[in-house]
Amino acid sequence: MKIGQIRQSLSGFYDVYADGQLYRTRARGNFRKRKITPLVGDQVEFDSTTPQEGYLLKVLSRTTQLVRPPVANVDLAIVVTATTPQEFSTNLLDRQLVALAVAGIEPVIYFAKTDLLTDADYAQRAKLAAAYRQIGYQVIMDRTAFSATALDALRQALANHVAVVMGQTGAGKSTLLNHLQPGLDLATGEISQALNRGKHTTRKVSLIPIADGLVADTPGFSSYEVFNIAANELTHYFPEFVALAADCKYRGCVHINEPQCAVKAALAAGTLLQSRYDNYLQFYETIKNKKVIYNKKK
Ligand SMILES: Nc1nc2c(ncn2[C@@H]2O[C@H](COP(=O)(O)OP(=O)(O)OP(=O)(O)O)[C@@H](O)[C@H]2O)c(=O)[nH]1
Ligand SMILES: [Zn+2]
């Protein structure tokens, strides 16, 4: 018996990486009976006589599990954010950050297409990046796109992680991966197309070794990911709110209508980003509305 990690899944075959090589395996029948679907990223116990023939015996417990892409044990996400005025949206960025926090995945924000910005726009994005860093997020950006500094920072962030790349169509995900790993040759514009293909097409999912980490070749999390949390929990996923909330008068303050709210005080004092608060309010309402519909259905 060996222990390894599923690096690729395709048409019922699982390529498991163990002691420096890949073993092609299949799941035993009892997996289907027990309704266990092995996922790329899973740590598994397996048996094999040759690298071409083996069987999965057991899937070890997962730390995280994504539906899209279907990958287990992802613990890092590169949030590729196009910074051009036409594409940039703090709403989308914050939405992604909340979705990741709910999933228990650490984000690394990468500001893309900075080479297309005017100096004034670049300065504005740099200021915003500083504000996000102050909240505690890692933000990678550089005036020159794909500079050695930016790519090295990203490679460092990836080390010893299983990562997924996220970002809207055309944000620059495949271009970035190609720069991170020259020779990878992902066709630009290809990634999202793969996601939109018919449900019945068997899609290959694989983890690509990049620097000292692994990156899923299929991006994840659409921008419309719904939050599977209650509205009053949303505040927990805004780290700067969490830090302030200790000074709110009411325990469980959701920072909307409550008096003596430290979050609203910070907003008034200009120490909290207005866009963060606006997006918080909008997500809050979205969750509230979704909740009503959900309850009616039930
Ligand atoms: N100037 C500039 N163009 C970029 C940069 N990053 C990506 N692009 C261009 O933006 C377009 C979209 O980039 P992709 O890498 O295909 O974006 P993607 O996120 O993979 O897109 P989908 O696969 O559709 O989700 C391509 O024409 C890229 O050449 C950048 O940093 N600077
Ligand atoms: Zn409050």
Image (cartoon, rainbow, N blue to C red):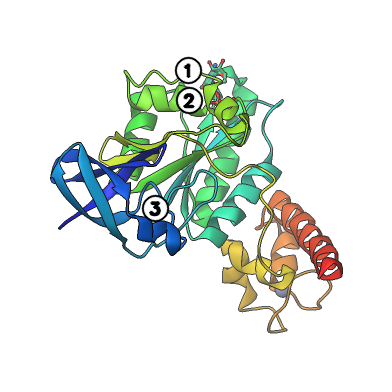
Measured in 3D between alpha carbons, the distance from the residue under mark 2 to the one under mark 1, in whole angstroms, is: 7 Å
* 12 versus 258 height, above or below: above
* 155 versus 178 height, above or below: below
| Residue 233: x %, y % from top left | 66, 71
| Residue 199: x %, y % from top left | 61, 36
Of 85 and 291, nearer the camera is: 291
Q: Quadrant of residue 227?
A: bottom right
Ligand 2 falls in quadrant: bottom right
The answer to the question of whether label 2 and label 1 lie on touching residues, with beta carbons closer than 8 A, is: yes
Q: Secondary structure at mark 1?
A: loop
Q: Quadrant of the C terminus?
A: bottom right
Give, as a three-letter code, the residue at label 1: Ala
Measured in 3D between alpha carbons, the distance from the residue under mark 3 to the one under mark 2, in whole angstroms, is: 26 Å
Examine the rendering and report whether any part of residue 143 can be seen. no
* Mark 1 lies within 8 Å of ligand 1 (Cβ measured): yes
| Residue 39: x %, y % from top left | 41, 50
On the picture, is 58 further left or further right than 187? Answer: left
Q: Quadrant of residue 258?
A: bottom right
Query: Circle 2 is placed at which residue position?
Result: 174
Classify mark 1: residues with Cα within 10 Å, few (<14), some (14-19) or many (20+). few
Residue found at x 57% / y 36%: 167
Q: Secondary structure at mark 3?
A: loop
Which of pointers 3 and 1 indicates the residue nearer the eye? 3
On the picture, is 25 further left or further right than 248? Answer: left
Badge 2 or badge 1: first in the primary sequence:
2
Residue 38's tag is 3
* Mark 2 lies within 8 Å of ligand 1 (Cβ measured): yes
Give, as a three-letter code, the residue at label 2: Ser
Query: Circle 1 is placed at which residue position?
Result: 187
Badge 3 or badge 2: first in the primary sequence:
3
